[in-house]
Amino acid sequence: MPIERRPLREQIREELLTRLDRGDFVAGTDVNEAALAAELGVSRTPLREALITLAGEGVLESNQGRGFRFAPVSRKEFRELCEIVAALESLALDCSDPDHLRRIAPELLTMAQEFPDRIAEQQEIERHDDEWHDLLLSGCRNERLLDLITSVKAGMRRYAHLLAGDDTPLEREATEHRLVAEFLIAGDLPKAAQALRDNWVNGMERMMSRIPSTD
Amino acid sequence: MPIERRPLREQIREELLTRLDRGDFVAGTDVNEAALAAELGVSRTPLREALITLAGEGVLESNQGRGFRFAPVSRKEFRELCEIVAALESLALDCSDPDHLRRIAPELLTMAQEFPDRIAEQQEIERHDDEWHDLLLSGCRNERLLDLITSVKAGMRRYAHLLAGDDTPLEREATEHRLVAEFLIAGDLPKAAQALRDNWVNGMERMMSRIPSTD
DNA sequence: TCGTGATATTTTGTATTCAGAATTCATAGT
DNA sequence: ACTATGAATTCTGAATACAAAATATCACGA
């Protein structure tokens, strides 16, 4: 087996994203490069490279002379991101091999049904949801699109911890996933794509109230 | 007036993109950081920051230990990018204020009609096309989406110089722009969005033959 | 002639240093 | 008491230095 060797900047980026998921960072606050670098046990150089990457993904903002800060959250931006991901995942479905979709549809249905319990940890729920979406898009032949979706979703991670601890979304999520899977089994791609978009729109509406209304 | 002060990495990024437009770089070749930094008159640090940004936009690829290289072009990827931009611009139209669209529609029509002559320089044609699209999206309220479109289009610049010197696309381009504008004047958003998508699809098909078929 | 391995050179990835901008703090003047 | 001014400090942006990895060079032997 090949042992893992990737640039520090990528490892740092991932570490920062998982910390973001945990809600370790407060939106709107600025990054102290020296302190963060020391905490991570790296120098400022690869840290800054990771910060620049994250800024490109919308996780951070940068201002000349005053460094980086975690981009503030807002309902407006969250709505914007959901609209974008909905359109992109819908497109990904269009770019997928219909045969492949039919083949994985049963698996998607199973996953939707065995949706984790509401007592499950937030992290577990998110992991399960991610896996479902990953499987859904596994047949997409547009590689650039998959990369783009990953990148945009990184920008959404700032909102992850705001959702934590809400019950109602769960069964709703499961229901919609089931719906998408059933349409795929029936071979009705347009309906599946529509249901997928609805999933994002509803998810958005559901979470909206938990986001500070700074706008 | 406030004098312009932006980070070196951004200026470098732009310089590299304009050189890309000119076809100065050969796709698939790797970047020599020291040489390029010297040529630009900067140190490797901000250059690398720019390279990392461009890698995030798909202009470059990076491999552990062997630095950056200009991402190879392929018909497959070009098709993928066109599909993405078509979907995103179409979405941007959906996110736009209908009143604003009606208001700018005449201007869009005018611009489509006074499309630059075929003897105009390639650079001029591209500038005109960009301006048209910028105006079209000027009413989009989804700011994140606009940023994303800009970013994806940066990734497409690698293909810009491959198109240079082709005549036929010109009037076709103008026709489609006119079509979109006319639908907007008529207030028929869905048709306009469809025409816009067609513009990208047709543009893609037209250019396809000029891209080396490495895939 | 081709391949193999040791050595030299180049180039990247990361750390460190330096200069200048932004911020903070204290002090003087109103 | 409050504002303005300037020094001190902190932090970023950029340059330089260094270590490790990759590549090139070359000698040697099958």
Image: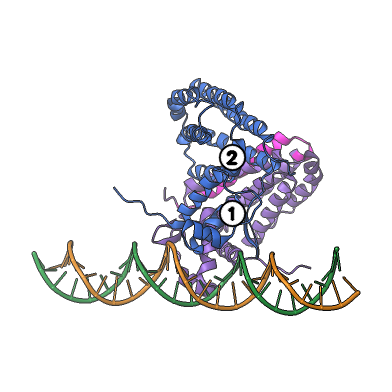
Chain colours: A purple, B blue, C green, D orange
Query: What is the distance, in whole Å, between disc 2 and disc 1 at their CAs?
Result: 19 Å
Look at label 1 and name its amino acid.
Ala
Q: Is residue A205 visible?
A: no
Q: Secondary structure at mark 1?
A: helix
- N-terminal of the pair, mark 2 or mark 1, is 1
Q: Is residue B55 visible?
A: yes
Magenta run includes residue A48: no
Q: Position of residue B26 (x, y in %)?
A: 62, 48
Q: Is residue A26 above or below residue A43?
A: above
Look at label 2 and name its amino acid.
His
Q: Position of residue B197 (x, y in %)?
A: 61, 31
Q: Which residues are magenta?
A: A184-212
- Dividing the picture into quadrants, the one containing residue B189 is top right
Badge 1 is on which residue?
B55
Q: Position of residue C6 (x, y in %)?
A: 75, 79
Write the residue at 66% across / 51% down.
B28
Q: Is residue A79 above or below residue A123?
A: above
Q: Nearer the viewer, residue C20 or A118?
A: C20
Q: Position of residue B209 (x, y in %)?
A: 69, 34
Badge 2 is on which residue?
B161
User: What chain is tagged by disc 1?
Assistant: B
Write the residue at 64% across / 47% down.
A172
Chief secondary structure of the magenta portion: helix
Q: Pointer 1: residues within 10 angstroms few (<14), some, or many (20+)?
A: some
Q: Pointer 2: residues within 10 angstroms few (<14), some, or many (20+)?
A: some
Q: Is residue A4 left or right of residue A161?
A: right
